Amino acid sequence: MIQQILIKYLIQHGRLGIPEIGMFQVKRIPAQVIADGSAIKGPESVITYQSEPVAADKHLFEFLSMETSTDEVTVIGQFNEWTQELKHKIFNHQTVELPFIGKLLLDEEGNISHIAPESAIGYNTVSLPEGVVFDSTLTGEREGAEQSDASWWIYAIILFLLGAAAIAYYYL
């Protein structure tokens, strides 16, 4: 049950730190044009893992407490038990599967590695109509042609001085 709540936390907050295990983050990959320009691959969300020291997260414990309708002390105890059980399984060379997050296992060097699940979250690849090819060189040329005016602040200062002069003239 705690795994389901942790998945909910990860999706809502974009990151989930598990002490002594590591940090999971939701990375959003924007839509991309397939190399030959005949299709567009939709945007998708991917869960990444970083093996780094993670401190206990008070917001996570508050979230778990709210979701389970129990006090924080009990939630912290349950979370620590679950974390120790997870760590024990991993370091006993068992593959641990966390639904929607992926598999955790110990590699040859003794580090925890993450195998992401096949992404079921995202859009499908869309083929362009026959004869239509997306030319990515046109977008690059447009970006160079549409340069913004970087001297906007000069106009702002001039307008400010004119406004200050008008106020001073009115009241003096």
Image: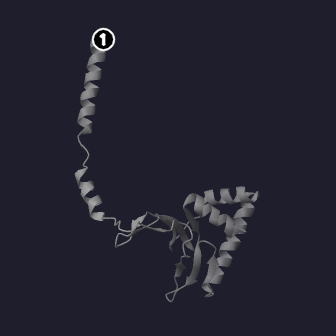
Q: Quadrant of the N terminus?
A: bottom right
Q: Quadrant of residue 155?
A: top left
Q: Position of residue 74 (x, y in %)?
A: 75, 63
How many numbered dots are placed on residues in this image? 1
Horizontal side of residue 23 vs 151, given as left or right: right
Q: Quadrant of residue 68?
A: bottom right
Q: Position of residue 122 (x, y in %)?
A: 53, 66
What is the secondary structure assignment of the residue under circle 1? Answer: helix
Instruction: For label 1, count other residues whose C-alpha is less than 10 Å away and answer few (under 14), some (14-19) or many (20+).
Output: few
Q: Quadrant of residue 137?
A: bottom left
Q: Quadrant of the C terminus?
A: top left
82 to 110, vertically: above or below? above
- The residue depicted at 76 percent of the width and 57 percent of the height is 69
- The residue depicted at 72 percent of the width and 67 percent of the height is 77
- The residue depicted at 67 percent of the width and 69 percent of the height is 3
Q: Position of residue 171 (x, y in %)?
A: 31, 11
* Residue at the far bottom in the pictured view: 108
Q: Position of residue 15 (x, y in %)?
A: 55, 63
Which colour assignment does the render follow? one colour
* Amino acid on which disc 1 is placed: Tyr
Q: Nearer the viewer, residue 93 or 126?
A: 126
* Residue at the far front in the pictured view: 130
Q: Nearer the viewer, residue 10 or 91?
A: 10
Q: Nearer the viewer, residue 99 or 139?
A: 139
Residue ID for mark 1: 170
25 to 86, vertically: above or below? above
Horizontal side of residue 137 vs 37, given as left or right: left
* Residue at the far right in the pictured view: 70
Q: Nearer the viewer, residue 105 or 43?
A: 43
